[in-house]
Image (cartoon, rainbow, N blue to C red):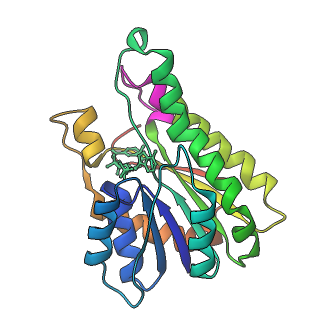
């Protein structure tokens, strides 16, 4: 499969890119930090080298993206994993905080989806996997400081349901995984001292399976992936 994964410079995205490459898939790894992507490509094992695409999704380079996808020969799977978390009490969140949070977690996904649509529409087994959060899952436990972050993830989950319907005729499946805590730098920065039940590598094994096979069983679904959060 031909796969584009965002947020691949560290955390769950990096581990997933490595797992997919190891499983024999052709992977483009996207993030802003060029050196981290180069290091990922160097570490990857598998029959195909991991291609790197340094890019800020807040200002995507359409030409670079199209060139990379043309070189790959198409796109079957997009994993919208890049994300940002601002942990700040609601009354201290500025408009700039809200805009930054929504721009990375929602609008950047919307922009990328628009750009890659022509490639996905050509794939016989297209799958968009949005990485959401239990924080944005209706009825789950909520935490102070996460209003901006959690509302973006709620929006991403709703976008998943809407787009699955809108793109059904084109045969593009769209699903979201709403994650509980995973031990990454994002988690450590937002919640110092919190110990998550899963490592990035453990979550990556599930991501790699779900990205490749999930569209056979699910479409328009937001699935909670958590053993601890109600
Ligand atoms: N860890 C958890 O407990 C947890 C729980 C629920 C949901 N999630 C979600 O899972 C996903 C991965 O989380 P993580 O913990 O692995 O996060 P992470 O370690 O902070 O990694 C985030 C990734 O997103 C990339 N990124 C951020 N802004 C970007 C931008 N403007 N353009 C391109 N890339 C950008 C970062 O790369 P650069 O800085 O190099 O650009 C990095 O590779 C996120 O969507 C997160 O919200 C995580």
Residue at horizontal 36 percent and vertical 69 percent from the top: 205
Q: Does residue 116 show up? A: yes
Q: Quadrant of the C terminus?
A: top left
Q: Is residue 136 magenta?
A: yes
State which region is magenta. Answer: 135-149
- Would you say 116 lies left or right of 53 here? right
Residue 25 vertical placement versus 59 (above, below): below
Instruction: Estimate the x, y position of residue 9 in percent, counting from the top left.
Output: 34, 58
Asked where in the image residue 172 lies, by quadrant, the reply is bottom right
- Is 90 on the left or on the right of 124, as rendered? left
Question: Which percent across, then down, holds residue 137?
Answer: 52, 36
Q: Is residue 56 above or below residue 173?
A: above
> Viewed as shown, does residue 63 lie left or right of 195?
right
Residue at x 47%, y 55% (from the top left corner): 55
Splitting the image into 4 quarters, where does residue 75 fall? bottom right
Q: Residue furthest bottom?
A: 47
Query: Which of the image's four quarters has the N terminus?
Result: bottom right
- Name, please, the residue furthest toward the right: 169
Residue 45 in percent (x, y) is at 31, 83
Give the mark count.
0
- Taking depth in this image into account, of 88 and 219 the one nearest to the observer is 88
Q: Nearer the viewer, residue 108 or 23?
A: 108
Please report the residue visible at 51 percent of the width from the left and 16 percent of the height from the top: 95
Task: Label the magenta part by its dominant secondary structure.
Answer: loop
Q: Is residue 197 magenta?
A: no
Q: What residue is rendered at 84% in x and 64% in y? A: 169
* Relative vertical location of residue 217 with respect to residue 165 in this rendering, above or below: below
């Amino acid at each position: 499969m031909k796969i584009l994964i965002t947020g691949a410079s560290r955390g769950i995205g990096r581990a997933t890119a490595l797992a997919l490459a190891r499983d024999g898939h052709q992977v483009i790894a996207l993030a802003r930090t060029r050196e981290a992507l180069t290091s990922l490509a160097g570490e990857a094992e598998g029959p195909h080298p991991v291609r790197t695409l340094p890019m800020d999704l807040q200002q995507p380079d359409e030409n670079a993206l199209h060139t990379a996808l043309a070189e790959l020969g198409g796109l079957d799977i997009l994993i919208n994993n890049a994300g940002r978390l601002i942990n700040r009490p609601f009354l201290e969140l500025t408009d700039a905080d809200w805009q930054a949070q929504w721009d990375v977690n929602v609008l950047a996904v919307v922009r990328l989806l628009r750009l890659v649509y022509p490639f996905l529409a050509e794939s016989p087994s297209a799958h968009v996997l949005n990485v959401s959060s239990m924080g944005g899952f209706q009825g789950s436990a909520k935490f102070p400081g996460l209003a901006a972050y959690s509302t973006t993830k709620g929006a991403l989950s709703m976008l998943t349901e809407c787009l699955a319907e809108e793109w059904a005729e084109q045969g593009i499946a769209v699903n979201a995984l709403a994650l509980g805590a995973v031990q990454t730098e994002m988690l450590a920065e937002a919640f110092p001292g919190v110990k998550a039940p899963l490592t990035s590598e453990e979550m990556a094994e599930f991501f790699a399976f779900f990205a490749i096979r999930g569209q056979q069983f699910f479409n328009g679904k937001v699935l909670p992936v958590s053993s601890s959060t109600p």
